[in-house]
Amino acid sequence: MSDIPDKKIASHNAAEEPLRQAQHLEAVGRLAASMAHDFNNILTIIQGHIGLLLDESSLSAAMRESLEPVATAADRAALLTRQLLAFSRKQVLQMRLIDLNDLVGDTASMLQRLLGETIVLSFNYCPSAAVVEGDTTMLEQIVVNLAVNARDAMPDGGRLSVCTEATSGAENAGSDPWVRLSVADGGGGISDEIKKQIFDPFFSTKERGTGLGLAVVRQIVEGCGGRVEVHTHSGRGSCFEVWLPIASPVASKEK
């Protein structure tokens, strides 16, 4: 070993680092998937019974006020399990044709609970169908993750806008039409240094963040043949744009 130059040893160690990191992430993914599956089964029961109780017309105002924070906590826990499952890629995807207008509308009530009363939530829907091919749960995960990320950027409250739009191929530097989903907030923006790392697994600027939210978003979007763009200015908020190809009218399949 003494005859081997230090530079060669350093080069060899540097080459092995990506492999070690990949093995570490794979092990974490397997553990996360196992725990998330079991935890998700428990949460399904909690969410189901809380939902039934909240639907009761005879429920008193005091009881409803006590149950709503439980429902919010269950939604947040379910969001975390979905992030873990998506990150570990252990979910069976049900690929189908989905109108993003309908999907975003279906998440509205859950988003409002997760965002809280200090966030003003607004929607702007594409006037025509915005149909893409994907898994409903995974696409909902994109919307929820981006919305929660925007909420955390506005600790004192603010306005969050969710928009869907059909675009021409030329607008997206290609020949085919795309659908653009955008989530914009009025937070403090993202610095150039942090912007380079926001999609890295386990990177977080939050005290109790998992660092999986945006990593999962990028993973899902790229799995659907799309991409994510971030437009941000210091003191002027951020806008995350998800570009997905408009689906061709063919039968979807399970993956």
Image (cartoon, rainbow, N blue to C red):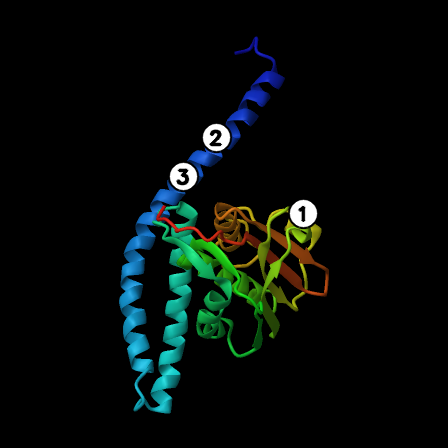
Indicate the amino acid at tag 1: Ala
* Percent x, y of residue 220: 48, 50
Secondary structure at numbered mark 3: helix
Which residue is rendered at x = 40% and y = 46% of the image? 88
Indicate the amino acid at tag 3: Glu
> Considering depth in this image, is 118 or 134 the residue closer to the camera?
134
Instruction: State how far apart marks 2 and 3 are (Cα).
Output: 11 Å
Secondary structure at numbered mark 2: helix
User: Does label 2 or label 3 sit earlier along the sequence?
Assistant: 2
User: What residue is disc 3 on?
Assistant: 26
* Percent x, y of residue 75: 40, 68
- Foreground label between 1 and 3: 1
Q: Viewed as shown, does residue 116 lie left or right of 241?
A: left
Contact flag, marks 1 and 3 (Cβ < 8 Å): no
User: What residue is disc 1 on?
Assistant: 173
- Crowd class of label 1 (few under 14; some 14 to 19; many from 20; radius 10 Å): few
Indicate the amino acid at tag 2: Leu
* Percent x, y of residue 225: 52, 46
